[in-house]
Image (tube, helix red, strand yellow):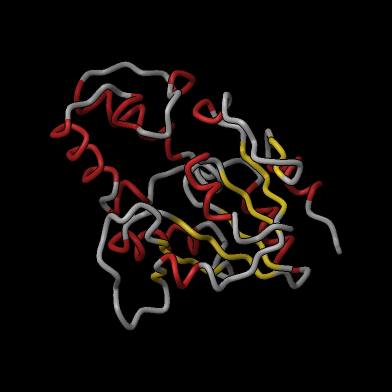
Amino acid sequence: MNIYIDFDDCLCETARYFTGLVANLFGKDVPYERIKFFDLQRSFSLSDEKYELMMIKAHEPEALLSFNETPGAVKTVNEWIDKGYRVSVITGRPYGAYEASREWLDAHDLKRAELYCLNKYGRENHVKDSSFSLEIEDYMKLHFDYAVEDSPLAFRFFEHLPKLKVMVYDRPWNEDADLPGSLYSRCYDWDMIRSMVTEE
């Protein structure tokens, strides 16, 4: 059994961190429940300059290491690994965030989970001779049985896997999203996600 898990807002509460960061940097009070777009620049109504500053600050190691676990995530992932499932955390974070991201996983008892930075949005050049960086063509060679994802923009990365079961973690920015088909299920917590992963 191979399982894909997105990092931000599936394993950890990234958007909740951003609400505090935007308040501290720019004095903007945007409650988590009002983050209606995956595009955070749009959700927080930021200029290009402010958005760039926010993203730089959010990807500093001390920031990445401070994100809170999404309740139930660690327990569930370790249960899967104990059963012999292969769990791959595939994130759109920039490659430069790998070390802090790996440290976060290790510190949260997820040392056995694999971590890959996938160039989902063309933000960076490929890191050559790396075991953790994926370009789209590399990713397309991988097979998964289940996926946990919160971003509707990432659904296109599942089109090559017609039997993939996708658990969409319910978040304010995906509440109005149309799920692509019957294999996509909206999940409200990790207990619900765990209940949907069954032996084939």
Check the image and report above or below for 170 versus 30: below
| Left or right: 145 in relation to 5 | right
Q: Nearer the viewer, residue 73 or 186?
A: 186
Residue at image coords 52%, 39%: 152
Q: Is residue 166 left or right of residue 28?
A: right
Where does the image place residue 156, in percent across and percent down from the top left? Answer: 53, 50
| Residue 164 occupies quadrant | bottom right
Q: Residue furthest bottom?
A: 129
The picture places residue 82, in percent across and down from the top left corner, at 74, 68
Name the residue located 25 percent from the left edge and 66 percent from the top edge: 125
| In the foreground, 131 or 162 | 162
- 18 w.r.t. 91: above or below: above
> Picture coordinates of residue 60 (x, y %)?
25, 51
* Of 97 and 187, the residue lying toward us: 187
Residue 73 lies left or right of residue 119; in this view the side is right
**What residue sits 27% from the left and 21% below the top?**
45
Q: Nearer the viewer, residue 51 or 56?
A: 51
Query: Residue at point 64% right, 69% down?
Result: 143
